[in-house]
Image: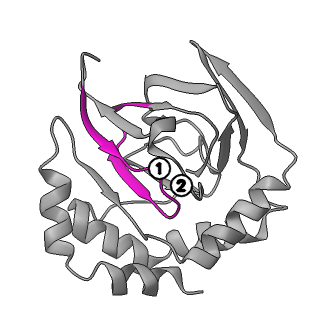
Amino acid sequence: MNIVKHVKDNFPSVSRLNKQYVATPPHPTLCLDNFIPLDTVRAMKAECDSLQWDKEFTRAGSHMVEKSDLDDCPVATDVKNQLSSASFLKWLGDITGHYDIIPDPYMVGAGYMRCARGNSLKIHTDFNFNNDLKLYRMLSLVIYLNEDWQKEWNGDLQFWDFERKGCVKKGAMEIQSFGLSWTSRTVSLSKRHIQRWI
């Protein structure tokens, strides 16, 4: 499926999205539902369920597994390629006001990630310098693969103030949900069993 066409058809008003994006203090954030076609997200979920995970991440009370080497992940590779296209980057530029976005071909800090029931990704600030590319990371894009997520399980995407005193915005955990944030943001994901694509 053409993801970029789906995105543009479902979110034609980039000026409205830009207003939402820039209106979130302390730094811009955007959360959208139905971002990627459902069949693509389900294919990503099936691929995620069959993975041999590259890395286990445990730090400061957080625990998850990650897969950033996508050589054996054809669905994720296709999604990455479409979201790295000039057409999608132009759409992102119209929303963020940044037309100098360069996608990371090495997927540093990106790919599939999973937290099992009872684990969590604690409040943190995403890294903002990509040492492989010698460039600053501008945006983090998160796509959720959770179907039939129950709100009482918590695990929503949370954007916190810089002092980590309070959450300023929450994003849904629904399948096809999308979160976009400026990378200097402090974020938290308290999870029950969450799968996402970063």
Q: Where is residue 37 in the image (x, y as percent from the top left)?
A: 53, 78
Query: x%, y% of residue 102?
Result: 44, 60
- Mark 1–mark 2 contact, CB under 8 Å? yes
Residue 149 x %, y %: 54, 51
Q: Image quadrant of residue 91?
A: bottom left
Left or right: 149, with 115 as reference point: left
Residue 159: x and y, percent?
Answer: 31, 35
Helix, strand or loop at label 1? It is loop
Q: Name the residue under label 1.
A: 173
**Is 173 rendered above or below residue 7?**
above
> Horizontally, is 72 left or right of 1 in the view?
right
Residues shaded magenta: 167-188
Identify the residue shown where x is 50% and y is 41%: 134
How far apart marks 1 and 2 lie (CA) works out to: 6 Å
- Residue type at mark 1 is Met
Color scheme of the displayed model: one colour
Q: Residue 62 carries which label?
A: none
Residue 46 vs 156, above or below: the answer is below
Q: Going by the picture, which residue comes out furthest to the top? A: 60
Please say whether residue 114 is visible from this viewpoint. yes
Tag in front: 1 or 2: 1
At 53% from the left and 55% from the top, the residue drawn is 144
Asked whether 93 falls inside the magenta stretch, the response is: no
Would you say 12 lies left or right of 141 here? left
Helix, strand or loop status at disc 2:
strand
Amino acid type indicated by mark 2: Tyr
Residue nearest the observer in this picture, 143 or 54: 143
Q: Confirm whether residue 70 shows in the render.
A: no
